[in-house]
Image: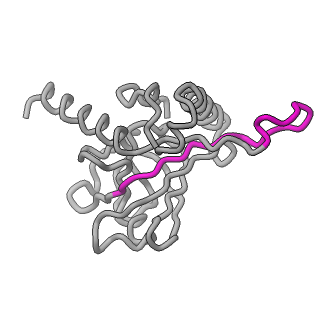
Amino acid sequence: MSCRAHRAASLRGIVAALALGAFVILAPADLWADDSSPAPAAKIEQHGVASYYGDSFNGRKTADGERFNENAQTAASPVLPLGSKAKVTNEKNGRAVEVRINDRGPYVDGRIIDLSRGAARKLGMEKKGVAPVRVEEHPAAQPTARLRKEVENLAVRQQRCTFGEGRRAVRLHRPVPCLDASTPSDSG
């Protein structure tokens, strides 16, 4: 496959994953309250299907330059910042794992995140290979000030888009249209 065809296929996969996934910002309950009390920070939340990758990628370089370790607690996301931490919860069994985003993907239509085999094992999805999940990122949970700011900016951008679309976007778990998967944050 040519480089151009691979890029086009990758972009189609990313766009499809976003179309089926849903980034939703959970607005604080006191959003309309008086401004004298500080509102809790927004978070990024996505619902969709997770898969995992392992054997054939083990030892290959990831998007952030490190070698992939299938037993680590890492993941690939088309839009979440490289180096950021996310909590992934299996919506079927309630099991959760914290992962570090170190790669881009998934490149399969309908998937929102690719987990390492180690993370998939913790979620109890290793045998099936896929599971419905919730992916959450909180600015305060990020390991560096730069990543906290980057996740906060992404959350604010998503919040503006969600409110721009009205409550229907939240209610229907529709993806936020102005979050462009073709321009992920790669400053990790």
Residue 3 lies in quadrant = top left
User: Among all residues in the image, which is located at the extreme right?
Assistant: 36
Asked if residue 125 lies left or right of residue 83, the reply is left
Left or right: 166 with respect to 107? right
Question: Is 112 on the left or on the right of 156, as rendered?
Answer: left
Q: Position of residue 130 (x, y in %)?
A: 31, 63
Question: Which residue in the rendered view is the most extreme toward the left?
Answer: 1
Comparing 188 with 43, the one in front is 43
Examine the rendered structure and indicate whether residue 5 appears above or below residue 108: above
Give the percent coordinates (x, y) of residue 129. 28, 66
Q: Is residue 68 visible?
A: yes
Residue at left offset 33%, top offset 71%: 126
Q: Main secondary structure of the magenta part?
A: loop
Q: How is the image coloured?
A: one colour
> Which residue is located at x 55 percent, y 32 percent?
162
Measured from the top left, where is residue 103 in percent x and y? 37, 44
Q: Quadrant of the N terminus?
A: top left
- Labels in figure, total: 0
The question of residue 86 being in magenta is answered with no
Asked whether residue 143 appears in the rendered view, the answer is: no
**Which segment is the magenta one?**
30-50
Q: What residue lies at 59% left-to-right and 40% top-to-bottom?
A: 25
Residue in front for this viewpoint, 134 or 58: 134
**Left or right of residue 140, residue 184 in this image:** left
Give yes or no for residue 31 being in the magenta stretch.
yes
Identify the image quadrant of residue 160: top right
Q: Which residue shows up at 92% across the image and 33% down it?
A: 36
